[in-house]
Image (cartoon, rainbow, N blue to C red):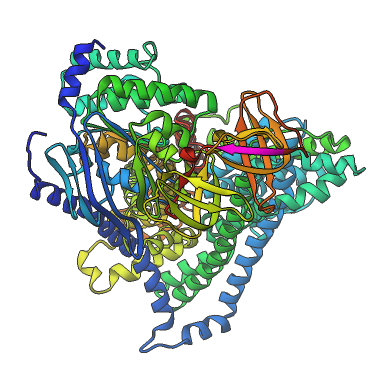
Amino acid sequence: MTTGTLRTDPPARSQRFAVNWGWLAWFVSILWLFFLVALPVGVIVISSVFDEGVSLDHYAAFFTSSALLTATLNSLLVAVGIAGLSLLIGGPLAFGVARTEMRFKGLVRATMIIALISPEFLLAMGYILLAGPNVGYFNVLIRGAFGIEGASGPLNVFSLGGLILTALPNGVAFVFLALVPAFTNMDPALEEAARVRGASALRAVRDITLPLMRPAMLSGALLAFATSLAMFGPPQMLGINVLTVAIRDALVRLNFATASVAAMVLIGLSLIALFIQRWAVRHVERYRTLGGKSFGARTIDLGWGTHLLTALGLVYGVVSLVIPYGAMTAASLMKSIGNGFSGDNWTLDNYRVVFTDPGILKAATLSLTLATTSATLVAVMGVVVAYVILRVKARGRALLDYLAILPLAIPGTALAFALIVVYLNWPMNMLGIYGTPTILLVAYLARFIPLGVRNSQTTLLQIAPELEEASRVFGASELKTLLRITAPLILPAIVYTWLLVFIMAIPELSASVILRGFGTQTLSTALLGIWSGNGGLAVASAFGMSIFIVVGVLFGLAAWFARRSGLLRGVQLA
Amino acid sequence: MAPQDRAHHKGQAHDLHLLGLEKTYGNYHAVRGIDLHVPAGHMVSLIGSSGCGKTTTLRMIAGLETPSAGSIRSGDIVLSEGRQMLPPEARDMGMVFQTYALWPHMTVAQNVGYGLAQKKLGKAEIADKVRQVLDIVNLPSHAERYPSQLSGGQQQRVALARAIASEPRTLLFDEPLSNLDAVLREQMRFEIRSLQQRLGITAIYVTHSQEEALALSDSIAVMREGRIVQSGDPTTIYSLPETEFVAAFIGLANILTLSGASRDGQSLVGRLGTSQPIRAAAGAIETARDPLKICVRPVEITVLGAGAAIAPGMNSLTGTVRDTIFTGGLVDYFVRLDAAPEIELRVQSTPPIRARKGEPVTLVFDPSRTVALRD
């Protein structure tokens, strides 16, 4: 700096420039969230009340249609059933793993993680192989063992109860993952106080531990409830009429009015669940901040209770992990599923088909392209939106914050319906993306926005503004500061988001199945086609296991990366 | 660093001038017109309780806040004039942040060399300079560590090294010691002071600790509600506070309110309740006020037994010891005054203990050490 006079112009311009960066980010964020979130949601709302003028006729029609009322009832029954059973199973297991000396903790943990990363249709396939009424292994075994006459039963997975059991492991995993940290972080002194006053160990758990866990239990159960409402694959495969399936059926019959009302009902229920869930979690966070210090997980001796937990963990792990995945693996290696476990029935041909079939390879290429593109865009835009929400002093930041998490409450089928309406009608139809891979990309982007924004928000919150200010003071321009300080610090969040979105995009089903055109099969829609068509269950099993292995390896990579970069704390999976 | 280096730097030092500096956030006036001159090579402390505007002032000097009005000059360069300002990176400053603000993804050497790299120095030159500066702050072997591998005190030293590495025109300190424990704080205090004097860089030091301000600075500016209420060198601020606020903020003070005050030659005289006349010969004595507030430091008061002879011309008050506390180097006495029982004077003197709880005493203090306050 050698000039002796005030250089009015350069600094003034640089100031204006600085404001422009923020405003540019703000503007891009608004556009991004408007087109991907606000527009589809708005379209669902409008088309549900609009029929040559505003009316509630669609709703009236909906609530007088017994098929749709059944679908709503089924959806609620399934979601409530899964949430309730998840608490009953996931709660004790979380407590057992976090606070007792139960055995098989590793098996329980593995079951939870695998349930969480499994494509939603995978377990359904496994259970259909096991409990399909005619040739399900269990049914064949039971009929043989008890000499039951006939060719079907006694178990039937194609039922409401079957659907609940099929989708249960995912819900159990949500409850488990919400509760383990809560149990671990709890101050054991609270329980000890109760025991000092003469309460038994079980009584201390009942009177002290459980009430303290209520927010985490509520949070996990509501997540289980919301994801159960949103699932499409299992009910479709089991032929159960729930709301997501009803939306698709209405669309197939081009009945947009019914589809819109079904979507509204679905979104309304999800919104309520997610709203309560966020409220519950906020309560938990406040509680945790007050505590501050971390307590070494202290185990409690429950006596025979410990053995009960061990038994529960073992049975659960076997029933929801070992047997279905074992069945899938076995089926994927069989020449003919009907011939069962005989010595000459084994082959690797199914996998050879999976890796050579031109249709599957084409679908794989499309899924990989979609996953790569959506992961990249979601990760980058997540940083931009989070930056605007946290660092730019501009209007509408609270609105952006809400829009960015709204997709969590929009099931994929409902979103896909909304995108059809948007991109089939003027003016967006001029883009001509309906039926192309682009509309699938739009759906993936919208679905995964919350993941990108929340991960970046957590990371940005940990980067103190002083780090950027120090860079300016020590001579770096705003752009250089962004490149040298902010970008490297936020990079781990970007990579982690990228991996997670990629993992979730590869097996995406509920939006893809509605939006795909004839030429745009994704991995999951191709798999569903082979499963229900003439490709054969064995090939479908090999196909499903292949997807699962790819996703599992990637998840392992993401987990390793998160642990290495210290990101695991605070970053959320969904 | 050799003496000629110091002379070299002294020769380059620039003074810093704040004129009518203001900052408003909406309706809130954080800074309401600061005039301050920091002579070249001097260190000035801005001190005040939280919310007084001291940090905002520092951030305006750094260029991290845009002033609402007023100007800032460093030497003959205008840093800001009204709302027009040089960006922070063009100001050639070094700054130590309260949180240190070390970049966690860079090694100590990269942190310290960052400013040098921005000045487009060569790699070898940067490495040389970094080594030199790390020597100065006694961390020669920590260059390749990451900040998270250092203790709080070491992080503080790295922050200091980073601030001085590029030999800035101005050094800014934003409560740099508030996150350290007491022992380390005192040690760093001396190190910062000797370093700043050795380098001869003009410096501003923001703190809420009067001890730090007194020990570190060439002069102190006491701030309150966005204004400087008094500034001067540490001894003047301490011995001649102009207001009750300054007297109470810097050091311990007994504030007494005298009634019937009037001028008597070179001093002001008044009574505390029913006491003998008390004379204040220091401070704002140009005009007599009634009532008149005066300040006497606890260490300026001598404790004598009841009825002891009093030297002519000294102020004296009688009272009863309510409590005595022995703290090692000093004894604290809390004395309830006979002339005004609702008032308790605090007295500090070196051991031995001269009076115990419940004993009557006479307190004596010099009128030339008794300061008349403006308000």
For the record, the magenta segment spans B361-365
Name the residue nearer the viewer: B24 or A324: B24
* Quarter of the figure with residue A277: bottom right
Locate the N terminus of chain A by quadrant.
top left
Asked if A12 appears above or below A295 in the picture, the reply is: below
Q: Is A429 positioned to the left or the right of A162 in the image?
A: left
Residue at x 44% of width, y 42% of height: A500
How would you classify the magenta stretch by its main secondary structure?
strand
Asked if A162 appears above or below A399 in the picture, the reply is: above
Q: Position of residue B245 (x, y in %)?
A: 47, 50
Residue B260 appears in the figure: yes
Residue A340 appears in the figure: no
Q: Is A267 positioned to the left or the right of B346 in the image?
A: left
Q: Is A396 positioned to the left or the right of A200 in the image?
A: left
Name the residue nearer the viewer: A401 or B104: B104
**Picture mark count:** 0
Name the residue nearer the viewer: A422 or B315: B315
Q: Position of residue B128 (x, y in %)?
A: 23, 12
The outermost residue toward the right is A198
Q: Position of residue B108 (x, y in %)?
A: 35, 21
Residue at x 54% of width, y 33% of height: A333
Residue at x 19% of width, y 28% of height: B13
Q: Is A487 positioned to the left or the right of B255 in the image?
A: left
Q: Is residue B236 magenta?
A: no
Q: Position of residue A447 (x, y in %)?
A: 41, 55
